[in-house]
Amino acid sequence: MAHLSLTVNGAEVAVEAPPDTALLHVLRDHLGLTGAKIGCGEGACGTCTVLVDGQPARACVTPAAQVAGAQVLTIEGLAADSALHPLQRAFLDTGAFQCGYCTPGMIMAALGLLRQRPDPSEEEIVQFMQGNICRCGMYARIVRAIRRAAAELRATGAGGAR
């Protein structure tokens, strides 16, 4: 067992876990943050996507010890003051989900994109989101939601920061 100190959603947390424990299991099993979903377990489907220092990371294949000292942001950390993040709201408004299992990972990956490119083209969105799988096939609505959120974030001057 190792003592791991992490910053998750702005809060310092400490857990005892084997050093090779996946970040996904630390989030879900030790911290009770179940927004990042268990999918393929190989980093291929994107359901477990979180941001590590602002960059999308597959929590299922990222050792928790590797992110010690980093800023980890999960879907649970997006809403501020009981207000949904523009990406969350856009996914709701456009119906960009059906079963919803992939949605947290999609939103977190999209946030990573919007932090890098505040005004991505449709082609850039499709390219960036390639690694996130939606078994319900809601891709067109997901792209629409990301474009809508990007426009809102640019209009409010928030970029992808909030």
Image (cartoon, rainbow, N blue to C red):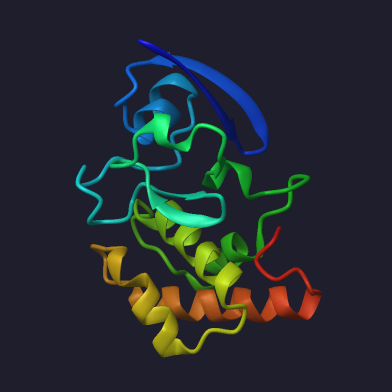
Task: Tell which of 99 and 23 is nearer to you.
Answer: 23
Give left or right: position of 137 versus 9. Answer: left
Horizontal and vertical percent position of residue 64: 40, 31
Give left or right: position of 26 versus 22. Answer: right
Task: Tell which of 57 and 65 is nearer to you.
Answer: 65
The number of numbered discs placed on residues in the rendered structure image is: 0
* Residue drawn where x is 55% and y is 81% of the image: 147
Horizontal and vertical percent position of residue 22: 32, 32
Task: Tell which of 126 and 143 is nearer to you.
Answer: 126
Examine the rendered structure and indicate whether residue 77 appears above or below residue 63: below
Examine the rendered structure and indicate whether residue 74 appears above or below residue 92: above
Residue 140 visible in the displayed image: no
Give left or right: position of 148 versus 135. Answer: right
Residue 147 visible in the displayed image: yes
Examine the rendered structure and indicate whether residue 15 appears above or below residue 107: above
Q: Assign the C terminus to one quadrant of the image.
A: bottom right
Q: Tell me which corner region of the image, top left, top right, bottom left or bottom right, holds residue 125.
A: bottom left
* Residue drawn where x is 40% and y is 64% of the image: 97
* Residue drawn where x is 25% and y is 56% of the image: 45
* Residue drawn where x is 67% and y is 55% of the image: 84
Horizontal and vertical percent position of residue 123: 40, 89
Horizontal and vertical percent position of residue 126: 37, 80
Q: Assign the N terminus to one quadrant of the image.
A: top left
